[in-house]
Image (cartoon, rainbow, N blue to C red):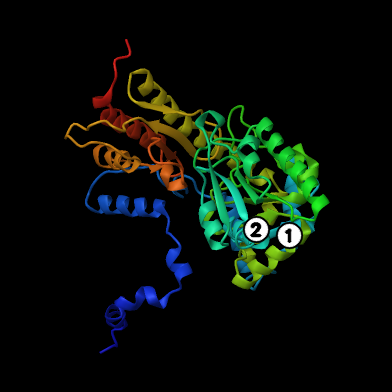
């Protein structure tokens, strides 16, 4: 009989927490993954669930570009399977600089670009290269994962509660009380979870504030404050919303900016893990050492195929145009449906569609009693009501650090058809109808 190693693990379960470090024990898992597990359980029980939680794409609905698949296959067949350099292949780094020159009209030197396996390693490497233990990181809530990167680098996180009327974006006024002590200011646009885009006025004032503070610090010999700009959704903006780049608005901010990007969202290629950062060369060199030691580089075939397609935008232009139309159509259908419910007196509203794959929706059920007599007191109560009554799975903003009781939720359209959006709206309307108010 084979040795039952699992049985040995079970015998030692009482030592589990002692066997791992206090640091590891203190790292919290994703709230979104916990919701996903609940959705899987309900579906396994035979429940129909409209799942709008996933910040990813269903490849049956949104496959990656054919040219990307063909390109990766070609590189594999050509034997491109050995280690890439930790900084990234020169072909891809050059293609990134060409992309930004063509689309943003900005010249970026190749030595400022570092490649990683998606956006996460460059994000973490930026934190690790810039932030020392106890340093202050200022960031907005809601936001994705910044609190975890603060924990990983033992930084002192200062979460700023943003407002829906400012698009849940961090402003210079928000940062001002903390700028003297800040080491890093984190911003994401288009933003996960809100789907909103920073305005030119907001970003310009923030850059000006950081530049003024760094001018002061140069006179005192203090370490500068750095802007970490997460732009992974930048090619998914809609309507009047436009993507803005800090060093295009204020060129002098470039030595104090790390910008992160990836093919993950705008080519629906989350699992292919190709991302990069643009950073001052002296920061990029430190990031390279970190990524190299943990082996967090993108695969060589994926890098080469991505490089070729970035240099040949005509091969993916039709894909991106169609992809954006499909994402926008789903988001706008959701927004119209939510707006209709609001006009009919249901306690719900949505922000205008601007970017990414998300819609911000506020559900005003706190303090209400459901038809079965349950009092809804928390955002988790509301989430569970929508899931179990309407079969609609959503992510509350509390999962992104937002204060309890706001009623704001994220709806994601990366894995739903137009028909599924219609069905979701019908289920939401039915679940919210008992709470309708007279609008006459």
Image position, residue 22 (x, y; %): 45, 70
Which image quadrant: the C terminus?
top left
Image position, residue 72 (x, y; %): 60, 60
Q: How many marks?
A: 2
Query: Callout 2: few (<14), some (14-19), or many (20+) C-alpha neighbours within 10 Å?
Result: many
The answer to which of 199 and 429 lies nearer the viewer is 199
The secondary element bearing badge 2 is classed as: helix
The answer to which of 37 and 81 lies nearer the viewer is 37
The answer to which of 174 and 78 lies nearer the viewer is 174
Which image quadrant: the N terminus?
bottom left
The answer to which of 61 and 229 lies nearer the viewer is 229
Which mark identifies residue 47?
A: none
Which mark identifies residue 126?
A: 2
Image position, residue 53 (x, y; %): 40, 45
Query: In the image as oriented, which residue stretches furthest toward the left?
Result: 372
Tell me the residue at 62%/65% (across/down): 297
Query: In the image as oriented, which residue stretches furthest toward the right?
Result: 219
- The part of the image, by quadrant, that contains residue 88 is bottom right
- The part of the image, by quadrant, that contains residue 190 is top right
Tell me the residue at 66%/56% (across/down): 276
- The residue pinned by badge 1 equals 283
Residue 290 lies, with reference to residue 231, above or below; the image says below
Query: Callout 1: few (<14), some (14-19), or many (20+) C-alpha neighbours within 10 Å?
Result: some
Q: Earlier in the sequence, mark 1 or mark 2?
A: 2
Tag 1 and tag 2, C-beta contact below 8 Å: yes
> Going by the image, does 347 lie left or right of 307?
left
């Amino acid at each position: 009989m084979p040795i039952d190693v699992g049985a040995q693990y079970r015998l030692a379960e009482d030592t589990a927490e002692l066997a791992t470090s206090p640091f590891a024990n203190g790292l919290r898992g994703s709230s979104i993954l916990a919701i996903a597990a609940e959705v899987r359980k309900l579906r396994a029980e035979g429940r129909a669930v409209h799942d709008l939680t996933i910040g990813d794409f269903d490849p049956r609905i949104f496959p990656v570009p054919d040219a990307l698949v063909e390109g990766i296959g070609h590189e594999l067949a050509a034997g491109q399977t050995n280690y890439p350099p930790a900084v990234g292949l020169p072909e891809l780094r050059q293609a990134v600089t060409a992309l930004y020159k063509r689309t943003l009209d900005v010249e970026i030197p190749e030595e400022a670009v570092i490649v990683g396996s998606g956006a996460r390693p460059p994000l973490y490497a930026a934190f690790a290269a810039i932030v020392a233990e106890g340093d202050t990181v200022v960031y907005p809530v809601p936001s994705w994962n910044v609190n975890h990167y603060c924990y990983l680098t033992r930084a002192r996180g200062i979460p700023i509660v943003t407002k829906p009327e400012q698009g849940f974006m961090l402003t210079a006024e928000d940062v001002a009380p903390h700028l003297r002590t800040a080491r890093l200011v984190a911003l994401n646009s288009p933003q996960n979870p809100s789907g909103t885009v920073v305005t030119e006025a907001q970003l310009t004032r923030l850059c000006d504030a950081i530049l003024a503070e760094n001018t002061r610090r140069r006179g005192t010999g203090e370490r500068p404050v750095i802007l970490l700009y997460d732009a992974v959704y930048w090619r998914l903006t809609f309507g009047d919303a436009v993507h803005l780049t800090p060093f295009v608005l204020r060129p002098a901010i470039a030595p104090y900016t790390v910008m992160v990007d990836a093919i993950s969202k705008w080519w629906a290629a989350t699992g292919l893990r190709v991302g990069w950062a643009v950073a001052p060369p002296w920061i990029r060199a430190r990031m390279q050492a970190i990524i190299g030691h943990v082996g967090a580089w993108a695969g060589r075939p994926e890098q080469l195929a991505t490089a070729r397609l970035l240099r040949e935008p005509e091969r993916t232009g039709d894909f991106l145009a169609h992809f954006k139309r499909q994402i926008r159509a789903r988001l706008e259908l959701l927004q119209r449906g939510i707006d209709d419910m609001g006009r009919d007196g249901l306690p719900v509203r949505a922000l205008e569609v601007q970017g990414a794959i998300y819609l911000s929706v506020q559900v005003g059920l706190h303090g209400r009693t459901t038809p079965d007599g349950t009092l809804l007191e928390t955002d988790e109560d509301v989430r569970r009501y929508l899931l179990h009554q309407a079969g609609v799975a959503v992510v509350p903003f509390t999962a992104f650090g937002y204060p309890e009781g706001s009623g704001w939720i994220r709806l994601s359209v990366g894995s739903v058809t137009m028909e599924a959006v219609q069905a979701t709206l019908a289920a939401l309307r039915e679940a919210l109808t008992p709470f309708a108010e007279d609008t006459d």
